[in-house]
C-alpha cells in the first residue's frame, strides 16, 4: 500500500515537473515547425499537381455559390456568367480556369457582404451524367454572409478633431451589395452631424459605385468666429482605372448658414453671415502609390479636385471654379556603411488651390467668394509652425480665408536611436512654407485679378516655419509633436512658437 | 534669547519657500536661451495680406446693420423693418453719423437687427470694438456727442407699450399672416435676399410665418383678426389725441425717441412703395391726419423727403 502511495506521489511530482516553461516552449515550437513544414509540403504538392496539370483543358460547366441566401441571382449572374465556358469561345486550361474563379471570388470579397474567408472547391461531375463532357468541372464557392444590420459606436480622429459617433449599417439591402449607412456624430469641433448614405455597386462591379447621401451638420469655426450649419444632399459616382487611379464625379447641393457669431466677430465675417446655397459638380482624381498612408518611405501620392458651382444651370448663391492640387512623395535615404533599408527617408509635399469667381446662372455679374468657399491654410496638419488657419488674410481676430494658395513642405524622417526602424516612431526635421491670398481688388477683369494674385504668390519669401519633432503612425491616424519656429510671416498671421501637437490622416 | 531666534528662523523659512516657488515657476516659464530664440523669430515680417473682395471697406464712422437692400442702404434710405427704422431714425435725430449696411439676423450678436459696429480707430481698445445692441443705443449716442433728450415718464411708458404691443401685433399679423401681404410685401423683402433657391426660400418663409404666429399666441390663445385690427385702431386714435396739434410728441420742441418709434410704423404703413395689398391697417392710420403729417415732417427732415 505504502508503495502504491509512493508511486502515486512520484507520478504527481513528475506531472508537476513537466510544467517547465522552457521545455513547453520548445515543444510548441517544434509542433508549429512541423505543422508549417507539413502545410508547406501540402501547398507544394498542390502546386505541383496544378502545375503538372496546368495545361489540362477544362470547361467550367457550373458555378455554385453556397451560403448566399440574401444575394440576388441576377447580381451574381453578372459576375459568374462571363467565366462560364458556355459563354466563352475558347477552352480554358486548368490554370486559367482557376485564375478566373479566383478573381471572381476576389470580386465577391470586395463587396464586403461576405466574411472574407471565401473557400473555393472544384469537383468533376458524375461521368455517368449524359449532360456532362469529360472536361467539365463544377466550381463551388463557400461563402458566409455577414450580418445584414450592424450597429457601431466609437470614437474617431480626423484632422485636428476628435469625435464620438454612432453608426448603423444595413448591408445587401436588395441582394446586390447595396448598403445604407446612417451616421450620427458629435465632436470637439463638429457640434452635431447626421448623415445617411446609400451606396450601390454598378453592374456588379466593386470598382464602380454610385452613392447618394443626405447630411445635416453644425460645425464650430473658432478661427473665424462663427458656426457653420449645413443641410445638403448629393450623388456621386466613383470608379477605378486599370492603372489603379481613382476617379469620382458628383453633384452636391447644400444650404449653408453662417450663424452664431462670436461677440468680437470681424466685419468681414458679419458680412458673410446668413444663408447661401451652393450647387456644384465636382471631380476628384487620385493615385496613391505610397508604401504607407501615414508614414511613407517610398512612393508618391497625387490628387486633384475640381469643382464648378453656380454657373449656368447649376444656379444657387455661390458661383466659382475651384481647383486644388496635392502631391507628395517619399524617398528612402541610404546611409553609407549600413546595408539594406536605413529607415531614414525624405518626404516632400506640395499643395495649391485657386478659386475663379463666375457669374451666377446665365448672368454676367461676377460675385466674389464667400467665407465658406475660400481656402484656409496653416495648422499642425498642413503648414506646421502656424496656428489653425493662421496663414492668409485676417480681419481683426478672424482668419477670413483666401482665394489662391500654395504650400510646400520637406520632412526628414529618422528612426529613433535604439528603438529601430521597424517601429512606427520617427524623429523628424521639417521646414514648410505657404501663402494664402485674397483676389486682388480693382482689376479690370476677373481673369486679370486671378492671374495677378497667382503672380503675387511669388512675391517676397513665403511665410515659413521650421522645426523638429516626433512622429508616431498609429493605425488610425498620424500623431506629431513638434517644436516649431515661424521664421517669415505677414503681419497678422499667427505663428506658433514652441510645441505644437497634431493628429490627422492627411499631412502636408 | 528665544525671541531673537524666531524671526531669523522665519526669514530662513520664507526664503526657502520663495526659492521653491521660484523653482516651480521656472519649470513653467520659458528657459532663457529659448526665450532669446523666441524673441528673435519671426526674422522677417511683411505687411499684412489684403482682405477678400466681399469684406466691407473700412470707414471712420460706425456701421448700422439693418434690414435693407444694398442699394437703399448705400443711399441712407429708411429701413423696411420697424425696429431697424426706429433706431435708424433715432440716430439721425441724435445726429450720430453712421453708415448703413444691409444685413440679416444671423449677423447680429442678439439674433435680431439692428446693431451698431463702432468704427475702428488705431487707439480703440478691444472692448470698444464690440457691437452695440439696440438697447444701448441711447447711451451710445449720448456718449458719442449725440443730441439726446430723453425724459422717461409714466405717460411715456404707457404710450410706448401701445406701440410695442397693440400696433406691433397688428403689424405682425398684417405683414406675415395676411396671405396677400405676405406674398406681396414680406416675401420679397425678407425671403428673397437670403437665397435664390426655391426650397430654401420656402423653408425661410415657413419659419417666418411660424415665428410671427408664435409671437402673437404669446399673449392670447387664439388669433382674432378683428380684435387685432380694432386694438390697433384704438391705439392710433390714442396717439393721435396725444399728438394733438403739436409738431412732436409730448409737446417737445424737437423730435425724440418716441417720435422715431411712431415713425417706424407710420412710415412703413404710409409708404406707397411697400406695395400693401390688404390695407386695413394703412386705412386706420390714414384717417388720423396729424399722424400722417408727423410722418411727413420726419421724412422730410431726416430722409430728404
Image (spheres, helix red, strand yellow):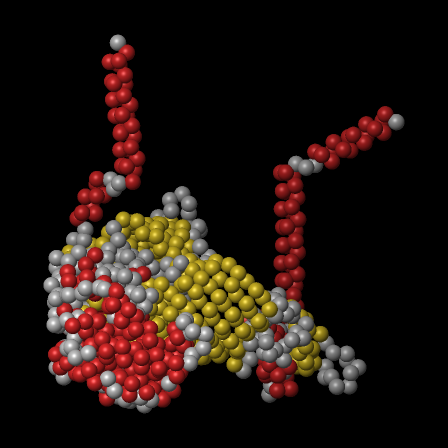
Task: Please give left or right for residue A82 compared with residue A446 in the image.
Answer: right
Quadrant of the rendered structure where residue A456 is? bottom left
Residue at figure coordinates x 53%, y 61% from the top left: A153
| Residue B282 rendering spot, x and y as whole percentages | 28, 86
Give the residue displayed 57% in from the left and 71% down from the top: A170
Q: Depth check: give the residue in front, A459 or B282.
A: B282
Q: Is residue B214 above or below residue B182?
A: above
Q: Tell whether A307 sits left or right of B294.
A: right
Which residue is most to the top?
A: B1
Q: Quadrant of the N terminus of chain A?
A: top right
Q: A498 above or below B264?
A: above
**Is B39 situated above or below B283?**
above
Q: Is residue A217 visible?
A: yes
> Quarter of the image containing the C terminus of chain A?
bottom left
Q: Is residue B90 visible?
A: no
Left or right: residue A298 versus residue A16 is left
Identity of the residue drawn at 40% across and 58% down: A188
**For residue B193, what is the image quadrant?**
bottom left
Residue that appears at 40% across and 63% down:
A190
Amino acid at each position: 500500500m505504502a508503495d502504491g502511495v509512493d508511486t502515486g506521489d512520484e507520478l504527481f511530482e513528475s506531472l508537476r515537473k513537466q510544467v517547465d516553461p522552457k521545455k513547453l516552449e520548445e515543444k510548441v515550437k517544434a509542433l508549429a515547425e512541423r505543422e508549417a513544414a507539413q502545410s508547406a509540403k501540402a501547398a507544394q504538392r498542390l502546386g505541383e499537381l496544378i502545375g503538372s496539370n496546368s495545361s489540362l483543358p477544362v470547361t467550367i460547366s457550373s458555378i455554385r455559390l453556397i451560403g448566399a441566401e440574401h444575394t440576388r441571382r441576377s447580381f451574381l449572374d453578372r459576375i459568374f456568367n462571363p467565366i462560364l465556358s458556355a459563354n466563352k469561345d475558347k477552352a480554358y486550361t486548368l490554370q486559367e480556369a482557376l485564375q478566373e474563379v479566383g478573381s471572381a471570388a476576389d470580386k465577391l470579397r470586395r463587396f464586403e457582404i461576405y466574411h472574407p474567408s471565401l473557400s473555393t472547391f472544384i469537383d468533376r461531375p458524375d461521368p455517368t451524367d449524359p449532360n456532362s463532357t469529360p472536361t467539365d468541372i463544377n466550381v463551388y464557392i463557400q461563402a458566409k454572409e455577414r450580418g445584414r444590420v450592424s450597429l457601431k459606436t466609437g470614437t474617431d480622429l480626423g484632422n485636428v478633431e476628435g469625435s464620438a459617433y454612432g453608426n448603423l449599417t444595413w448591408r445587401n439591402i436588395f441582394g446586390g451589395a447595396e448598403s445604407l449607412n446612417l451616421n450620427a456624430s458629435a465632436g470637439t469641433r463638429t457640434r452635431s452631424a447626421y448623415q445617411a448614405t446609400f451606396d450601390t455597386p454598378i453592374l456588379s462591379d466593386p470598382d464602380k459605385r454610385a452613392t447618394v447621401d443626405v447630411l445635416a451638420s453644425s460645425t464650430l469655426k473658432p478661427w473665424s468666429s462663427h458656426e457653420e450649419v449645413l443641410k445638403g444632399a448629393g450623388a456621386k459616382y466613383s470608379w477605378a482605372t486599370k492603372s489603379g487611379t481613382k476617379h469620382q464625379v458628383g453633384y452636391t447641393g447644400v444650404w449653408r448658414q453662417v450663424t452664431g457669431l462670436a461677440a468680437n466677430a470681424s466685419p468681414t465675417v458679419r458680412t458673410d453671415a446668413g444663408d447661401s446655397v451652393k450647387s456644384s459638380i465636382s471631380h476628384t482624381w487620385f493615385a496613391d502609390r505610397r508604401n504607407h498612408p501615414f508614414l511613407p518611405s517610398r512612393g508618391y501620392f497625387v490628387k486633384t479636385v475640381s469643382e464648378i458651382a453656380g454657373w449656368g444651370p447649376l444656379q444657387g448663391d455661390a458661383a466659382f471654379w475651384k481647383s486644388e492640387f496635392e502631391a507628395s512623395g517619399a524617398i528612402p535615404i541610404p546611409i553609407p556603411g549600413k546595408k539594406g533599408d536605413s529607415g531614414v527617408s525624405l518626404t516632400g509635399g506640395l499643395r495649391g488651390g485657386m478659386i475663379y469667381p463666375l457669374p451666377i446662372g446665365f448672368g454676367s455679374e461676377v460675385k466674389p467668394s464667400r467665407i465658406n468657399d475660400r481656402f484656409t491654410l496653416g495648422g499642425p496638419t498642413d503648414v506646421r509652425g502656424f496656428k489653425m488657419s493662421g496663414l492668409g488674410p485676417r480681419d481683426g481676430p478672424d482668419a477670413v480665408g483666401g482665394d489662391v494658395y500654395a504650400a510646400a513642405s520637406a520632412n526628414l524622417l529618422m528612426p529613433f536611436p535604439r528603438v529601430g526602424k521597424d517601429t512606427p516612431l520617427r524623429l523628424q526635421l521639417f521646414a514648410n512654407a505657404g501663402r494664402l491670398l485674397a483676389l486682388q481688388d480693382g482689376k479690370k477683369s476677373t481673369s486679370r485679378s486671378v492671374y495677378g494674385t497667382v503672380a503675387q504668390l511669388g512675391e517676397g519669401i513665403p511665410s515659413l516655419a521650421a522645426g523638429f519633432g516626433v512622429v508616431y503612425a498609429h493605425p488610425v491616424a498620424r500623431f506629431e509633436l513638434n517644436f516649431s519656429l515661424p521664421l517669415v510671416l505677414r503681419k497678422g498671421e499667427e505663428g506658433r512658437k514652441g510645441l505644437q501637437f497634431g493628429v490627422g490622416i492627411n499631412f502636408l | 534669547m528665544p525671541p531673537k531666534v524666531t524671526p531669523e528662523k522665519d526669514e530662513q523659512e520664507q526664503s526657502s519657500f520663495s526659492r521653491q516657488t521660484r523653482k516651480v515657476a521656472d519649470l513653467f516659464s520659458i528657459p532663457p536661451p529659448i526665450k532669446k530664440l523666441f524673441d528673435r523669430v519671426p526674422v522677417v515680417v511683411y505687411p499684412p495680406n489684403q482682405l477678400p473682395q466681399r469684406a466691407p471697406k473700412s470707414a471712420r464712422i460706425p456701421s448700422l446693420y439693418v434690414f435693407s437692400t444694398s442699394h437703399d442702404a448705400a443711399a441712407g434710405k429708411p429701413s423696411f423693418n420697424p425696429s431697424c427704422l426706429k433706431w435708424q431714425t433715432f440716430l439721425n435725430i441724435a445726429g450720430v453719423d453712421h453708415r448703413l449696411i444691409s444685413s440679416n439676423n444671423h449677423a447680429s450678436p442678439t439674433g435680431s437687427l439692428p446693431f451698431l459696429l463702432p468704427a475702428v480707430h488705431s487707439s480703440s481698445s478691444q472692448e470698444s470694438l464690440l457691437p452695440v445692441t439696440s438697447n444701448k443705443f441711447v447711451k451710445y449716442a449720448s456718449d458719442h456727442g449725440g443730441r439726446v433728450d430723453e425724459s422717461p415718464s409714466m405717460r411715456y411708458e404707457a404710450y410706448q407699450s401701445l406701440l410695442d404691443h397693440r400696433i406691433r401685433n397688428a403689424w405682425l399679423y398684417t405683414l406675415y399672416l395676411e396671405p396677400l401681404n405676405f406674398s406681396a410685401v414680406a416675401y420679397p423683402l425678407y425671403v428673397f435676399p437670403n437665397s435664390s433657391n426655391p426650397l430654401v426660400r420656402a423653408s425661410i418663409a415657413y419659419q417666418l410665418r411660424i415665428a410671427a404666429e408664435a409671437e402673437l399666441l404669446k399673449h392670447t390663445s387664439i388669433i382674432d383678426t378683428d380684435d387685432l385690427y380694432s386694438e390697433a385702431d384704438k391705439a392710433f386714435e390714442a396717439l393721435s389725441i396725444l399728438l394733438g396739434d403739436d409738431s412732436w410728441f409730448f409737446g417737445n420742441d424737437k423730435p425724440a425717441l418716441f417720435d422715431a418709434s411712431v415713425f417706424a410704423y407710420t412710415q412703413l404703413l404710409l409708404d406707397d412703395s411697400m406695395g400693401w395689398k390688404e390695407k386695413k391697417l394703412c386705412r386706420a392710420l390714414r384717417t388720423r391726419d396729424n399722424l400722417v403729417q408727423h410722418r411727413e415732417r420726419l421724412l422730410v427732415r431726416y430722409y430728404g423727403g
